[in-house]
Image (cartoon, helix red, strand yellow):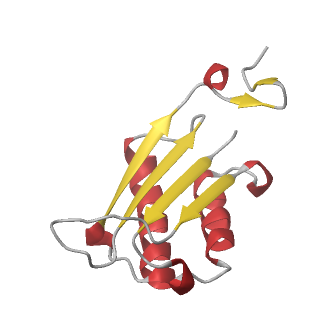
Amino acid sequence: RMPIVLIETNVPEANIPSTFVNDISAGVAASLGKSEDICLISVRGGANLIFGGSNDPAAFVKVMSIGRLGVEENKRHSQVISKLLEDRIGVSATRMYIQFSDVVGKDIGHNYTTIAKP
């Protein structure tokens, strides 16, 4: 349940295709084996971001999910996300970090409550 993906990049908003957020949503949902209708994706371009002392295209990605994260799973998710960022907005896999967080339902609010299992 509830994958949340937050992407910050120094790639200007004008250089990010309007379909990029949809591509990330579909790719992450498929990689996690979760329905796209519960995914929340945020992409912020034009961030004041530097990587390795360079202003070349770079990104920070945060992936939060209840389950479906782990050592081997995160390698697969990293491949999917890195490829999408390289192919769609020109950020090399060597110029991004991806943080994975396995969260619990009690810590995520939604629809006047939390998504904790009763």
* Number of numbered callouts drawn: 0
Q: Report the front residue among 8 and 74.
A: 8
Q: What residue occupies the far front of the structure in this picture?
A: 48
Q: Quadrant of residue 90?
A: bottom left
Q: What residue occupies the far right of the structure in this picture?
A: 111
Residue at x 42% of width, y 50% of height: 74
In the rendered view of the protein, which quadrant contains the C terminus?
A: top right
Residue at x 15% of width, y 68% of height: 53
Left or right of 11 in this view: 94: left
Left or right of 5 in this view: 118: right
Left or right of 3 in this view: 98: left
Is 102 rendered above or below residue 105?
below
In the rendered view of the protein, which quadrant contains the N terminus?
A: top right
Image position, residue 34 (x, y; %): 70, 50
Image position, residue 73 (x, y; %): 46, 48
Is 56 rendered above or below residue 29?
below
Is 93 rendered above or below residue 98?
below
Is 84 rendered above or below residue 51?
below
